[in-house]
Image (cartoon, rainbow, N blue to C red):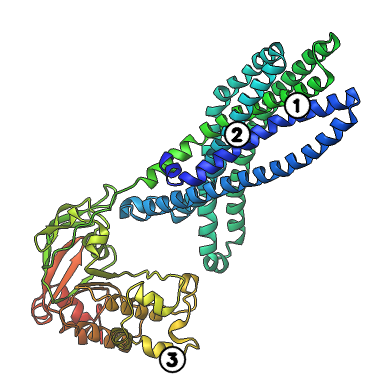
């Protein structure tokens, strides 16, 4: 966390400076009380009235210093958390695909909200307050030594037991805090899942089940919070009792010295005030150290994420053919999804891949764009192995349209551009080719129409048109389409596929359960996948002439739409 403190030298410096000033001014309040009481006891009205004026000015100044102390502390926390959350988000978003998918988005949301707040409130804030408490303690001891060294030594001796508390409570509190963090993650995951599953819950009469599941995660979270609060309460109670005992000892000793004439009444009041300046800071120091130590697990987890540099690679993708050499792949040591695949997608040509569900088609695309790299064999573009590149590098020249299309909560135009400079000619070309131009004519705000959460205001076919327009607008050399027109009617699908296949200088690879015969002849090569292997390949005419899988499916019309 040191680097986040160093990034804000001015705010941390002023926060610490004004916290020290506040503590020093708090200590001086004891001197003020001592003098005002002594003026009263001595009957010095003139001195009393003058000192009242001083006190008024002093407390105005104290209020200003206290305000600035809080402002600079808040500014330091704001700046530190901005940098920290930026690094955490960056660390999450650059994770490798397989690693990223090991956890849910709700868990990452919990990292960036609940866990970060814990670090802000119980770690960084505690450190700054700790500086003030230590200052208050040191200055209080100095003043007390001036008033009466014996009382000071007794108070310090009685208070030292407070430092045993962090050693006793730090580890149990850390475990409880880690449990709360985990339960927060489960809670966020579950409510995200239930809200996303609203339609399924309603249509399958799962209201009772949904309520029961929510009540369960809600109860577990609140129980974990209570257990943490309970342990904190035990810790605070013990610390408070020890602090109170120390305060009573100080008052008794000071009272004794007043009785025997060694201290004035004003000094007694000052000792009572300063006793709090020892017991309360020691209590606070013990609490803050315990809080800081209890965040260790969460702190290490977030720092590991923020320091992630998995894919900060700046290699550029070479141009050339996509070549697969003896590629095999499986998910988590299960049966191979792809078995010894060797093929070449030549630049500028058009390819079709057919296979039943589970035959390895979509997995092939995930390997080509670098989502998974734990395959055997090799995948190259030109002579460059994709294993040496990150997803960003690979996708700098490859567009992929997946079955599940994602859109940002922005308008249609913004979702097509995706931060790329607007080119009116190119934009008009791609929206016309994909039919998006006709689609928006029925919308009151045209291209400014916002795509709502989960794209509920668009049909599946409309979403596919926008997704294809987006891919075409970014003009990359390779276009991978996974069931890209499956939600369209046959006539619209044929028209769109023909338009895509007519594109020049673009290597197109299309996956489908069904191909339109009118577009099959436009494909340079068709690969038939079954059980993770290529069982047949060739162009349309070659495959029809063969007495193979393609020909049998063609004759029985199990694959092809007219």
User: Image quadrant for the N terminus?
Assistant: top left
From the viewer's perspective, tell me whether residue 140 is left or right of residue 453.
right
> Residue 395: image x %, image y %?
25, 65
In this orientation, which residue lies closer to the viewer: 203 or 323?
Answer: 323
Residue that appears at 48% across and 47% down = 80
Return the mark for residue 132. 2
Distance from disc 1 to disc 2, alpha carbons, whole Å, reads: 17 Å
Quarter occupied by residue 238: top right
> Residue 376: image x %, image y %?
16, 51
Q: Is residue 520 above or below residue 90?
A: below
From the viewer's perspective, tell me whether residue 320 is left or right of residue 425.
left
Residue that appears at 35% across and 45% down = 307
User: Image quadrant for the C terminus?
Assistant: bottom left
- Label 3 belongs to which residue? 441
Q: Residue furthest front?
A: 46
Q: Is residue 505 above or below residue 342?
A: below
In this orientation, which residue lies closer to the viewer: 340 or 411?
Answer: 411
Mark closer to the observer (2, 3)? 2
The mark that comes first in sequence, 1 or 3, is 1
Element marked by disc 2:
helix
Q: Can residue 485 be seen?
A: no
């Amino acid at each position: 966390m040191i680097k986040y403190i160093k990034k804000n030298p001015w705010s941390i410096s002023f926060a610490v400076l004004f916290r020290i000033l506040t503590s020093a001014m708090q200590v001086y309040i004891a001197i003020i009380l001592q003098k005002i009481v002594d003026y009263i006891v001595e009957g010095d009205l003139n001195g009393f009235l003058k000192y009242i004026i001083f006190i008024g000015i002093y407390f105005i100044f104290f209020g200003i210093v206290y305000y600035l102390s809080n402002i600079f502390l808040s500014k330091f926390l704001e700046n530190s958390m901005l940098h920290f959350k930026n690094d955490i988000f960056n660390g999450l978003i650059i994770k490798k695909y397989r690693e990223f998918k090991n956890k849910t988005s709700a868990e990452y949301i919990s990292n960036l909200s609940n866990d970060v707040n814990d670090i802000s409130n119980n770690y960084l804030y505690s450190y700054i307050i700790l500086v003030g408490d230590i200052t208050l303690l040191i200055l209080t001891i100095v003043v007390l030594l001036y008033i009466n060294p014996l009382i000071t030594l007794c108070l310090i001796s009685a208070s030292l037991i407070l430092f045993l508390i962090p050693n006793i409570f730090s580890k149990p509190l850390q475990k409880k805090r880690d449990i709360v963090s985990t339960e927060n993650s489960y809670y966020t995951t579950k409510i995200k899942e239930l809200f996303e599953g609203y339609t399924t819950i309603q249509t399958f009469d799962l209201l009772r089940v949904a309520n029961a599941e929510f009540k369960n995660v809600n109860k577990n979270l609140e129980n974990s919070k209570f257990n943490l609060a309970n342990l904190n309460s035990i810790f605070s109670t013990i610390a408070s009792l020890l602090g109170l005992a120390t305060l009573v000892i100080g008052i008794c000793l000071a009272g004794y010295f007043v009785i025997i004439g060694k201290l004035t009444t004003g000094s007694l009041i000052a000792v009572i005030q300063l006793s709090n300046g020892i017991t309360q800071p020691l209590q606070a120091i013990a609490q803050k150290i315990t809080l800081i130590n209890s965040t260790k697990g969460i702190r290490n987890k977030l720092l590991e994420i923020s320091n992630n540099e998995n894919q900060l690679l700046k290699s550029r993708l070479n141009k050339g053919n996509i070549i697969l050499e003896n590629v095999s792949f499986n998910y988590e040591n299960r049966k191979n999804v792809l078995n010894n695949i060797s093929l070449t997608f030549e630049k500028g040509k058009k390819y079709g891949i057919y296979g039943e569900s589970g035959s390895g088609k979509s997995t092939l695309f995930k390997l080509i764009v670098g989502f998974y790299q734990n395959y055997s064999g090799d995948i190259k573009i030109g002579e460059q192995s994709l294993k040496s590149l990150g997803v960003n590098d690979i996708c700098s020249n490859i567009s992929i349209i997946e079955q599940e299309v994602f859109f940002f909560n922005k308008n249609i135009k913004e979702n097509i551009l995706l931060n790329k400079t607007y080119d009116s000619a190119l934009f008009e070309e791609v929206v016309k080719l994909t039919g998006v131009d006709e689609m928006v004519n029925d919308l009151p705000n045209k291209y400014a129409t916002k795509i709502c959460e989960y794209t509920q205001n668009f049909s599946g076919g409309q979403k596919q048109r926008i997704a294809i327009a987006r891919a075409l607008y970014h003009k990359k050399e390779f276009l991978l389409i996974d069931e890209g027109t499956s939600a369209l009617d046959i006539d619209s699908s044929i028209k769109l596929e023909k338009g895509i296949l007519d594109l020049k200088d673009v290597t197109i690879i299309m996956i489908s359960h069904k191909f339109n015969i009118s577009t099959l002849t436009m494909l340079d090569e068709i690969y038939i996948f079954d059980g993770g292997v290529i069982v047949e390949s060739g162009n349309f005419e070659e495959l029809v002439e063969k007495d193979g899988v393609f020909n049998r499916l063609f004759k029985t019309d199990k694959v092809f739409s007219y």
